[in-house]
Image (cartoon, grey):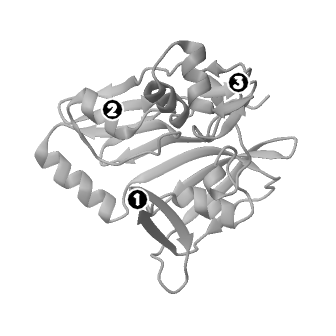
């Protein structure tokens, strides 16, 4: 017998259907090591679920101008903004972990935004990708982002896309997977994700751009250098490949 995944989960945990759907949508519900992707998908009613606990954001640095946190996966940037009471200088995707900057001072905010606009901010990420990347490479495909129904998806478009540049360097190879460093000069929506996918190295867990299902999207905001700040975030435990 089958039923919708969120209904089966709600019955097992004794919670509301709404809460069960939220857990699945956050990417916190697993069957074995496989993440449940679709809350409304049909599943056997005897399926046993595992629900992952969300880590709390860690303060990396704070002064009178900025708050830098190590954002866990499965939490949105907007949730951290709401909890802190400060404005976001940039955003990370829900399943991306790492350095997230919030601003306290209005004058500093103007300076910081200007640095982002003028591509003077150093943004370094680490990611686990499918395939073996043996040599560094630079990706400069122009990116077009389409927003529909409150969701965004980016595409490579030579005619309509905006300039985008990503430098990628291999760090570690494990089987047929490579851990890479990715440095972006521009900040297009889903830039690293769509660039790596187009280059033939989709990020593990990034099913939107052709990556194979994983415990999470394996992308981490490692380091940001902005004006006189240099903030680095350690990788979380779930970023390891065994």
Q: Pointer 2: what residue?
A: 80
Q: Which mark is residue 45?
A: 3
User: Distance between the Cα atoms at labels 1 and 3?
Assistant: 31 Å
Cβ–Cβ under 8 Å for marks 1 and 3: no
Mark 1 is surrounded, within 10 Å at the Cα level, by few (under 14), some (14 to 19) or many (20 or more) other residues, namely few
Q: Furthest-top residue in view? A: 14
Whichever of callouts 1 and 2 sits on the residue coming sooner in the sequence is 2
Q: Residue at x 70, y 24 (%)?
A: 45
Query: Residue 234 at what x, y percent from top left?
Result: 54, 28
Closer to the camera in the image, 203 or 7: 7
Query: Residue 136 at what x, y percent from top left?
Result: 71, 59
Q: Nearer the viewer, mark 1 or mark 2?
A: 1
Q: Which mark is residue 187?
A: none
Closer to the camera in the image, 200 or 53: 53
Query: Residue 39 at what x, y percent from top left?
Result: 57, 37
Is 86 placed left or right of 141 in the picture? left
Cβ–Cβ under 8 Å for marks 1 and 2: no
Q: Residue at x 81, y 53 (%)?
A: 131
Q: Residue at x 73, y 22 (%)?
A: 47
Q: Pointer 1: what residue?
A: 149
User: Distance between the Cα atoms at labels 2 and 3?
Assistant: 35 Å
Q: Furthest-front residue in view? A: 1
């Amino acid at each position: 017998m089958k039923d919708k995944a969120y209904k089966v989960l709600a019955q097992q945990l004794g919670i509301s259907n709404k809460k069960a759907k939220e857990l699945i949508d956050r990417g916190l519900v697993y069957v074995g090591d496989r993440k449940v992707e679709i809350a409304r998908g049909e599943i056997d009613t005897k399926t046993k679920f595992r629900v992952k606990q969300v880590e709390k954001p860690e303060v990396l640095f704070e002064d009178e101008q900025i708050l830098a946190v190590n954002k866990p996966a499965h939490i949105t940037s907007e949730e951290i903004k709401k909890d802190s009471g400060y404005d976001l200088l940039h955003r990370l995707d829900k399943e991306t972990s790492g350095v997230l900057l919030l601003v306290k001072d209005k004058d500093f905010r103007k300076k910081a935004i200007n640095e982002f606009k003028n591509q003077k901010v150093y943004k370094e990420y680490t990611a686990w990708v499918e395939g073996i990347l043996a040599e560094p490479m630079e990706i400069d495909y122009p990116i077009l982002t389409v927003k529909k129904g409150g969701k965004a998806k980016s595409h490579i478009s030579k005619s309509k896309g905006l300039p985008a540049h990503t430098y990628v360097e291999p760090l570690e190879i494990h089987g047929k997977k490579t851990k890479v460093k990715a440095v972006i000069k521009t900040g297009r929506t889903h830039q690293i994700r769509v660039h790596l996918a187009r280059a033939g190295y989709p990020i593990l867990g990034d099913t939107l751009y052709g990556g194979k299902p994983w415990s999470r999207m394996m992308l981490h905001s490692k380091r940001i250098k902005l004006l006189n700040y240099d903030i680095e975030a350690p990788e979380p435990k779930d970023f390891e490949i065994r």
